[in-house]
Image (tube, rainbow, N blue to C red):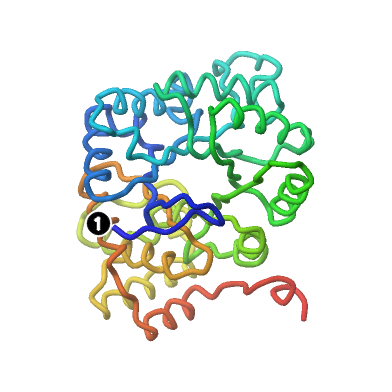
Amino acid sequence: MKYTQLGRTGLKVSRLVLGTMNFGPQTDEADSHTIMDAALDAGVNFFDTANVYGWGANKGRTEEIIGNWFAKGGDRRERTVLATKVYGNMGADGETPWPNSDKLSAVNIRRAVDASLKRLRTDHIDLYQFHHVDRNTPFEEIWQAIDVLIQQGKILYVGSSNFPGYKIAQANELAARRAGTIGLVSEQCLYNLAERRAEMEVIPAAQEYGLGVIPWSPLNGGLLGGVLKKEATGGRRASGRAADALADPASRAQIQAYEDLLDKHGLEPGEAALAWLLTRPGVTGPIVGPRTADQLASALRAVELELSAELLSGLDEIFPGPGPAPEAFAW
């Protein structure tokens, strides 16, 4: 496994991030523990989750699965850089949400941290991430709450997720005015070969303020994972948004060109899509969310892939990025 520092911090993390969103809803606890053990044995030390994972009536279940894994001992917690998130409503589905049970008020942040720590069966969270922008809570209040939690030793670093570039700038400019506040050190954003809008402003802002970029959905919902090849050979067919995209002739032709290019180079589409992200400026590591140990093994191979200049050029032709702002929309 290869490692890098998380943004401007001294924290060393693996170039792949183990995403745990499937743990609970799609992968049972025993198999989830097997995947986490395999990831740790392979050198993946960066695990990502969120308080709402488990979804619906099972919100928090994913954190519980991770907490039970930590409780097995064997230095599992000590060897893991643990990231979770706050924002979503943790109240029971179907009921009127109780005030202050979501978003980024100081009240909810304090309560959410304590609840996550209990489910995760640990005394601290290494990277606490804001899952979304809260337009109604000023960053002065957010940073005040975070400062207290850092002083208490409950969290060490803070990151954002799904933030636009201007919010990254706003958050860190306000943090800079507060003595001792480190500010955001990472941004978790939607970024992959087929979805490159983050290159316009989010990634440049992250680089300017020293944030590590953690792409989610690196295979674009499965579209970049060899979906047409699997379809042709009787494998798992595309569903949901991926199926909708393939119903569009232009999108289908684009994915076919992508798979043909990688076939020419003798590469697996999913592994190449991850390897491409690892070549991108500012990227710490993409989040991979394996449902099985075999999917994890495939993701691990991506770290060792070297993509040729010819292949990278071909990928840019198929999936041209927007380019940085303001040139992307001006002159």
**Residue 133 percent across, percent down from the top left:** 68, 41
Measured along the vertical axis of the image, is residue 223 above or below residue 289? below
Measured along the vertical axis of the image, is residue 11 above or below residue 76? below
Task: Say whether residue 125 is left or right of residue 295.
Answer: right
**Residue 262 percent across, percent down from the top left:** 31, 74
> The N terminus lies in which quarter of the figure?
bottom left
**In front: 177, or 191?**
177
Q: As drawn, which residue projects farthest toward the bottom?
A: 310
Q: How many marks?
A: 1
Measured along the vertical axis of the image, is residue 110 above or below residue 170? above
Measured along the vertical axis of the image, is residue 286 above or below residue 128? below
Where disc 1 sits, the SS reads helix
Residue drawn at 27 percent across, 45 percent down: 39
The residue that disc 1 covers is: 298
Residue 130 sits in quarter: top right
**Label 1 Cα neighbours within 10 Å, binned few <14 / some 14-19 / many ≥20:** some
Residue drawn at 66 percent across, 72 percent down: 324
Residue drawn at 58 percent across, 25 percent down: 152
Task: Say whether residue 181 is left or right of residue 280.
Answer: right
**What residue type is disc 1 on?**
Ser
**Residue 27 percent across, percent down from the top left:** 29, 33
Task: Say whether residue 318 is left or right of residue 204.
Answer: left
**Residue 310 percent across, percent down from the top left:** 38, 86
Residue 100 sits in quarter: top right
Residue 312 sits in quarter: bottom left
Residue drawn at 24 percent across, 62 percent down: 232
> The C terminus lies in which quarter of the figure?
bottom right
